[in-house]
Amino acid sequence: MEARVIDRPADMFDRVREWEALTRFATSGQPHATLGVVSGRRRQGKSFLLEALCEATGGFYFAAEQAAEAESLRHFSAAVGEFTGSALPVRFGDWREAIDGLLAVTADREIPVVIDEFPYLAKASPALPSVVQAALGPRRAERLRSRGRLLLCGSALSFMGSLLSGEAPLRGRAGLDLVVPTLDYRLAAEFWGIDDPHLAIQVHAIAGGTPAYRREFVEDDTPSGPDDFDAWVRRTVLNPASPLFREARHLLSEEPGLRDPGLYHSVLSAVAHGNSTSGGIATYVGRKASDLAHPLAVLEDCGLLRREPDLFRGNRPLYRINEPLVTFYQAILRPDWAQWERGRDTDRLWRRRRAAFHSNVLGPHFEQICRDWVTGYAPPDLLGGYPSTVGSGVVNDAAQRTTHEVDVVVFGEGASGEESLLAIGEAKWNDTMGMGHLDRLRRVRELLSARYDTSHTRLICYSAAGFMPGLENVAAQAADVALVGPADLYRG
């Protein structure tokens, strides 16, 4: 049976893929109850999506709160009673009764039934995932009689990720596993209504692609133009009265698996200050690398850190912070937290931290945007093929007794159809790039020729500050050299 089309709400920005997945699941036509899981980092609009789905289909929506099991059951019972219009109070004695009751009210109609913030309920009632598993047993009569589309939603990524993995009770039960991502850098600029590429990059380096940071946290306060950026920073993320000011601290404290906040803050601070390897992080924190294996894994599980391979050294993982606001907090706010919190001398403090903002926040963020551009937007003719793996890496130069960090490395399908090194690039936020930068890339390509076929490898310079005339002249004439600026990152 073909799923029916449900129009996306007019006030919903983008989320086309997510809306289509949810409506397809909610109207799949299956003759029995089905299960779906929706997850994603906080403030991405998951609840907005699910509430809109229920409004459009007449579905049931319940948002759990942090509470003891008995109180949560009372709230859930009351919500079911209100949904069904029952003249008598509805009282479920336990979660087994509650889930069966939810299936019973959807016996005659195909509608979504949403339990939002499911981790809150599971924390107070650890057996709840097993209860849901039993309720949705393949031959269970209650499941076969129901047409409910049960959707479990949550923001605790470590918990939600474990629901359907390994030996988890619900593994193999779900027909939908939807992760709601942050908006990418181009969509974020559109959402914030920013047309200037330089300004868009700076705002994204702080607020990232989290929709709530514009709507709720700064109440639609957007920079009026490039000249307003510093003032915008001071009246939002540096303002103790703004919710954005403490948000990064809350993101860490909200994760249930973080038992030593001081250690986790130090690990994040290490990464924010340019330490991307486990050894560099360990040195910064003052621990052995082996002691940090667990904290790094926990921060990965909860979505605050991600691990990427060094594309030239496969056994050397690199760690990046996922949330730009966390990087900004660790690099700019946390070192002077007491002074920022007093709200005095904000102008002086910001001027003092402006250099750190450029080096520790904007610089690495610009590199990541360049990698994202290659992954999703760069024209294949510029790269000489279609990218399959994009990242960064370090190349050893034994002759010159140094190493070269390559900001943008692109492997992909070349003209011959085989996997090849398509391009290497250097990204600079605050430097006008010249022939010295190109010469370094040429040296790196020469070193890599011992391991890869580099006969068609392009050299790409990415700069937000522009390019010197000599470099522009070479790029205009050389087929293997390209220059990319902020306008290119947002064009097309």
Image (spheres, rainbow, N blue to C red):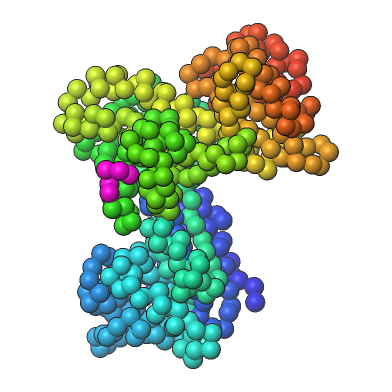
Residue at 27%, 33% in the rendered image: 334
Residue at 49%, 89% in the rendered image: 140
Residue at 51%, 53% in the rendered image: 15
How would you classify the magenta stretch by its main secondary structure? helix
**Position of the N terminus by quadrant:** bottom right
**Within the magenta stretch, is there residue 263?**
yes
Asked if residue 431 is positioned above or below residue 110 in the image, the reply reads above
Asked if residue 106 is positioned above or below residue 26 in the image, the reply reads below
The residue stretch that appears in magenta? 260-264
Question: Where residue 397 sits in the image (x, y, percent)?
Answer: 62, 21
Question: Taking the image as drawn, is residue 122 in sight?
Answer: yes
**Residue that lies at the very extreme toward the bottom in this rendered image:** 141
Q: Is residue 479 left or right of residue 24?
A: right
**Position of the C terminus by quadrant:** top right
Q: Could you say which quadrant of the image residue 485 lies in?
A: top right
Asked if residue 269 is positioned above or below residue 78 in the image, the reply reads above
Q: Is residue 438 left or right of residue 266?
A: right
Question: Where residue 78 sits in the image (x, y, percent)?
Answer: 27, 78
Between residue 480 and residue 441, name the one nearer to us: 441
**Residue that lies at the very extreme toward the top in this rendered image:** 470
Q: Could you say which quadrant of the image residue 414 lies in?
A: top right
Between residue 326 and residue 276, name the one nearer to us: 276
- Please tell me how many numbered marks the rendered image carries: 0
Question: Where residue 61 sits in the image (x, y, percent)?
Answer: 37, 70
Question: Where residue 29 sits in the image (x, y, percent)?
Answer: 58, 78
Question: Taking the image as drawn, is residue 203 in sight?
Answer: no
Q: Is residue 277 left or right of residue 404?
A: left
Between residue 483 and residue 389, name the one nearer to us: 389
Residue at 63%, 8% in the rendered image: 469
**Within the magenta stretch, is there residue 296?**
no
